[in-house]
Image (spheres, rainbow, N blue to C red):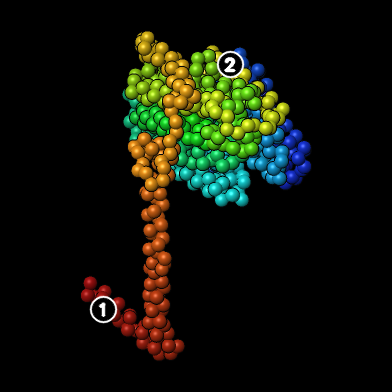
Amino acid sequence: MTILLGLIPLLPLFSACLLIFWQPKLLLTQIIAVGSISLSALLALILNVQLWDQAQFVLQVSLGQWLSIDNLSLGFTLYLDPLSLIMVTIITCVGALIHLYSASYMKDDPDVCRFFAYLNLFVSAMLFLVLADNLILLYLGWEGVGLCSYLLIGFWYREQKNSQAANKAFIITRIGDTAMLIGIILLFYQFDTLNIQQIQLQSQQLLQMDELPTTEIISLCCLLLFAGAAGKSAQVPLQSWLPDAMAGPTPVSALIHAATMVTAGIYLVARNMDLFQLAPDVLHFIAIIGVVTLILGATSALAQSDLKRILAYSTISQLGYMFLALGVGSASAAVFHLMTHAFFKALLFLSAGALIYCMHHEQNIFKMGGLRKSQPLLAFSFGIGCAALASLPMTSGFFSKELILEQTLLAHQPLLWWGGVIGAFFTALYSAKLFFIVFFGKLNQPSTHNTPTAMVIVLMILMLLSLVGGVQPQGLFTHFSAPADSASPGHTLSLFQHWLPILLPIFTVTLAWFMFIKGYFTPTTPSEGSSVSLKQKLHQFLLSGWDFDRLYRLIFIKPFKLVTEYNRRDIIDLAYRQLETFSSLLYRQLNRFQTGQLRHYSASLVIFCVLAIAWGLIQ
């Protein structure tokens, strides 16, 4: 099994290198790219079968020694346990489906070989991230994921907006990555090791003490690690890069949002949950950020008209739910929702890609409408994906989201629970709006293309997973549960608390039908010269994602531009020029003593000796 584990991240890495240096023709490129990640997915499934009946297991394989300095020893060691096995299975299986879809979607692109090289490297970096046994190897995969996302978001770099979106994603995530690196350094200072399991073991020992140690440095480390997670997983205030990341090809959006990158922050906190339990205030802060983010994403998605941006904001919102679960100490609920979200979000993005392909690259949902007759398969796949996103009963999203809300109540956080319920209302509303307008609205532009066979196969598999993927796999998500997962065993939910999250999506979908199909809601735009109403201002505020970009321009970009304008004459360099002038003047004055006359040097030596002796006698 150790050989299988080692091959899982190495196969896509090898294929990426092969595609970069060889650059074969289209068919061979597709075989190498899709075949390597499919083989990794097959190996992951084999590991699942072999380890299914084991309650606890640990599998390690060393790929070599990295460095050894004093008491710091780092190696390329892969670590497999129930948590990392779940992540590996999600990454490889969903990644394989996206690769198969991409083989059809990107076949006419002249840079298809470069695309698959980046895509395979992306998956390999994510696998190294989740399988790392030490924080430095995890950080290497972390940065690899960030680099590949930059390359893939800006894949069509000849358009300036795509390059700007890639730069925005890279720069914003660097903020969190820098904080995370500082946190890793402080963790080594505190625990004298960077091995993840040793840090968790020491954290468990501290948790078992009668009184929880109040060490400010541990809280600071957790905050810095969360900053890194917030950057990668698009949490407030580092979330504004994700909607613009839609500039890349649709399969890239599906991979980023479903199986890689944005899930890295969830994994980081879940992997170090024992450490975060030492800082309960930080966990509460994480839960608050999660609630704010989920409401921001849901309300912003409601105002969008671009199909992919709606899905992007929905990802931000669902990631907020996962951080809410982590904040109340339920790592199992967070990872469970991560898995179901990977299924239905991949289904939605790939269905959106097929729809955009059939609609001649049109992405405005108000220019579509009535497509259920011409595209019944896409209507069915979108319907299942939107139902799971809205957490309608008996879909995968229903089981995982309800578990998060239940764990929030069991952790005695009623305000956070209400935040989650409000987010669920808006989520169901924009999900129903998306589906009804595109497939039941007024027909604006007929669809003339059929969905390719490869895309159909992928969509059918994801539809099945989106429906049955939420069936609670007893035992699978309990091996890494935090203590809060079973908090307050005597506390039970009231009838209202139990039924509200179940009935709310059904009520909201019904409401959406009357709002968006029966004509009770019509999007309005201000006419030229007319005053902007409060409703239109609110719509613009939500359309811009709560105006975070304007806030960044006001706080960071405008002051920076003012400084650069003020420094147009190189005022900062003036200090260095003055230092140069002073140095030259001092040199010319001291150079006058260098006459070349021996008697002058002898006289100077005598004079300074006399003065030194006189000074000594005076003292």
Image point 42% across, 88% down: which residue?
595
Above/below status of 48 relative to 175: above
Instruction: Give the numbered dot on residue 468.
Output: 2
Above/below status of 178 relative to 325: below
Image point 49% across, 41% down: which residue?
241
The percent coordinates of residue 205 (x first, y second) are 42, 24
Instruction: Give the numbered dot on residue 614.
Output: 1
Nearer the observer: mark 2 or 1; the answer is 2
Quarter holding the C terminus? bottom left
Residue 187: quarter of image: top left
Image point 54% across, 45% down: which residue?
166
How many numbered badges does the structure rendering display?
A: 2
SS at circle 1: helix
The percent coordinates of residue 99 (x first, y second) are 67, 33
Task: Name which residue type carries label 1.
Answer: Ala
Task: Name which residue type carries label 2.
Answer: Val
